[in-house]
Image: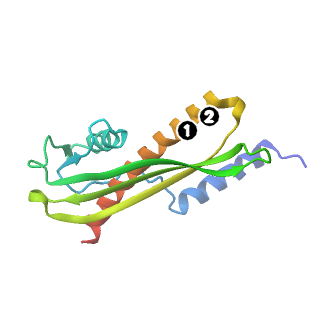
């Protein structure tokens, strides 16, 4: 069956009209309702760095406070942990697949330490195949997966904080 250029163009135009007409849109940046936020956590943590970067990029109405005393709200990172679990072994006892896990526990505080959001945990995981002959490549892939999970956790924290404000 041969499709002409006109028919192909009409088909693509129809599909794009359907997708835009259904209300689909990308999630985009979380709309943080507070004028200033402070991120309390390990300064060397990539998660803390991601949160600070996202708050700065959030627009002109949000600013990153220098301390919790001057902030309208404080995001306190209570703990974060990375873990690697073996999912499968080959017949010879070699690892065939890992699951990478990343856990973050945080809470949201008002001035003077009043708790707005009780300690909440985010658990992320990624499955990763493993091959002994590609040790360096798999090490790089693992680091990239952890970095992606840290970025995803930061986005989830900010979205949850924005949603918490909307439901009140």
**Mark number, residue 138:** 2
Up-down: is 133 above or below 60? above
* Residue at image point 52% right, 37% down: 144
Q: For the residues marked 1 and 2, what is the alpha-carbon distance in whole angstroms?
A: 6 Å
Q: Is residue 29 visible in this depiction of the protein?
A: no
Q: Which residue is drawn at 38% across and 53% down?
A: 104
Q: Cβ–Cβ below 8 Å for labels 1 and 2?
A: yes
Question: Whole-percent x and y of residue 120?
Answer: 33, 62
Question: Along the line of sight, which residue is nearer the eye, 126 or 156?
Answer: 126
Q: Which residue lies furthest to the bottom in this view?
A: 168
Residue 140 falls in which quadrant of the image? top right
Q: Residue 112 carries which label?
A: none
Check disc 2: other Cα within 10 Å, few if <14, some if 14-19, many if 20+: some
Q: What element carries label 2?
A: helix
Figure check: 136 above or below 91: above
Relative to residue 151, is residue 111 drawn left or right? left
State left or right for residue 67 relative to residue 157.
left
Q: Name the residue under label 1.
A: 142
Q: Position of residue 18 (x, y in %)?
A: 61, 59
Place of residue 145 in the rendered image (x, y in percent of width and height, measured from the top left): 53, 41
Quarter assignment of residue 73: bottom left
At 30% from the left edge and 59% from the top edge, which residue is drawn? 162
């Amino acid at each position: 069956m041969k499709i002409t250029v006109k028919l192909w163009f009409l088909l693509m135009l129809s599909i794009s009209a359907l997708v835009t007409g259904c209300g689909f849109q990308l999630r985009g940046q979380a709309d943080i309702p507070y004028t200033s936020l402070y991120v309390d956590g390990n300064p060397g943590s990539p998660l803390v760095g991601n949160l600070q970067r996202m708050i700065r990029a959030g627009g002109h109405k949000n600013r990153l406070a220098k301390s919790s005393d001057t902030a309208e709200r404080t995001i306190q990172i209570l703990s974060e942990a990375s873990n690697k679990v073996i999912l499968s072994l080959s017949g010879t006892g070699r690892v065939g697949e890992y699951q990478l896990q990343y856990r973050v526990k945080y809470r949201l505080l008002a001035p003077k330490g009043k708790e707005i959001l009780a300690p909440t945990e985010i658990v992320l995981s990624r499955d990763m195949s493993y091959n002994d002959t590609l040790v360096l490549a798999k090490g790089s892939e693992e680091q990239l997966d952890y970095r992606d999970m840290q970025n995803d956790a930061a986005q989830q924290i900010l979205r949850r904080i924005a949603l918490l404000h909307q439901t009140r």
